[in-house]
């Protein structure tokens, strides 16, 4: 998979690409990530990419020309173009699985007070990571990239994400490690029983119980 990200702040992605599972996925060529500075596609002598919006209003608006030129230079027939915006569809695990099957994703990080409305005509999908507003689309772009990359074959063990929260509309089951007894807080007996059928049954019961308590809306979808 290839992920191209259009941003005004490329250095924000340095840590994201050089640590942990993402770095390993890049090193083992499971994913290619390219960061493009939107200013590089500005025809303005000062590399300006924003302007005041028609009709007045506070703040600056991201212009369409540099976005259009950037997309024209990097998109292919396999590209799916995503715009990060609070007005997009709410992102979830199902969408992460769907996007992990794509060959090429292009993610546009918005900024300022918004973007020229005509940019919407250039994209295939608008995504929001929740009902709140951030200063820009960089952190959401990292979040969805991380969620997608970990689902690519060979990045992590398949079993590690099959039981993730939100798969089958259930939250994940509780997990424990040593010591068995820490200040009176004990690991459930079933987990140290060695009886795998009972363990599997307990885990499924705990998933349903936890989901009912914390996210009953998910059970309504089952």
Image: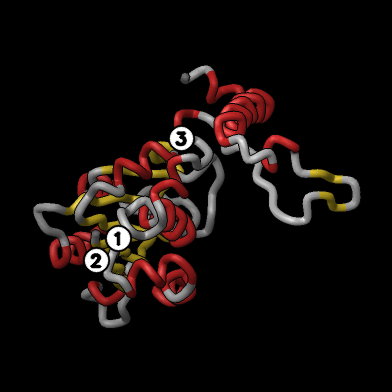
Q: Residue at x 78, y 55 (%)?
A: 179
- Assess whether mark 2 and mark 1 are in contact (beta carbons under 8 angstroms): yes
- Assess whether mark 3 and mark 2 are in contact (beta carbons under 8 angstroms): no
Q: Nearer the viewer, mark 3 or mark 1?
A: 3
Precedes in sequence: disc 2 or disc 3: 2
Mark pair 3, 1: CA separation: 39 Å
Does the image show residue 211? no
Q: Which residue is tagged 1?
A: 63
- In the image, residue 184 above or below residue 43: above
Mark pair 2, 3: CA separation: 38 Å
Q: Where, by quadrant of the figure, is residue 112 drawn?
A: bottom left
Give the x, y percent position of residue 184.
Answer: 90, 46
Residue 167's label in the rendered image is 3
* Left or right relative to 218: residue 44: left
Q: Which residue is tagged 2?
A: 66
Depth order, front residue of 82/220: 220
Q: Secondary structure at mark 3?
A: helix
- In the image, residue 99 above or below residue 23: above
Q: Where, by quadrant of the figure, is residue 7 drawn?
A: bottom left
Does the image show residue 186? yes
Q: Secondary structure at mark 1?
A: loop
Query: Which color scheme is applied?
Result: secondary structure
């Amino acid at each position: 998979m290839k992920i191209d990200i259009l941003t005004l702040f490329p250095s924000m992605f340095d840590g994201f690409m050089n640590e942990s599972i993402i770095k390993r996925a890049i090193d083992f060529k499971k994913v290619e990530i390219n960061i493009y500075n939107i200013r590089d596609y500005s025809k303005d002598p000062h590399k300006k990419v924003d302007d005041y919006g028609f009709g007045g209003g506070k703040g600056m608006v991201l212009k369409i020309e540099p976005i259009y030129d950037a997309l024209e230079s990097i998109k292919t027939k396999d590209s799916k173009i995503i715009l990060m915006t609070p007005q997009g569809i709410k992102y979830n695990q199902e969408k992460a699985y769907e996007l992990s099957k794509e060959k090429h994703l292009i993610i546009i990080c918005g900024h300022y007070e918004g973007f020229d409305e005509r940019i919407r005509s250039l994209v295939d999908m608008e995504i929001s990571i929740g009902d709140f507003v951030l200063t820009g689309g960089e952190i959401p772009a990292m979040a969805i990239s991380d969620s997608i990359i970990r689902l690519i074959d060979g990045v992590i063990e398949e079993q590690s994400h099959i039981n993730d929260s939100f798969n089958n509309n259930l939250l994940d089951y509780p997990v424990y490690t040593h010591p068995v007894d820490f200040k009176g807080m004990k690991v459930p007996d079933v987990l140290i029983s060695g009886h795998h059928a009972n363990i599997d049954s307990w885990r499924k019961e705990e998933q349903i119980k936890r989901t009912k308590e914390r996210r009953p809306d998910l059970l309504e979808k089952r």
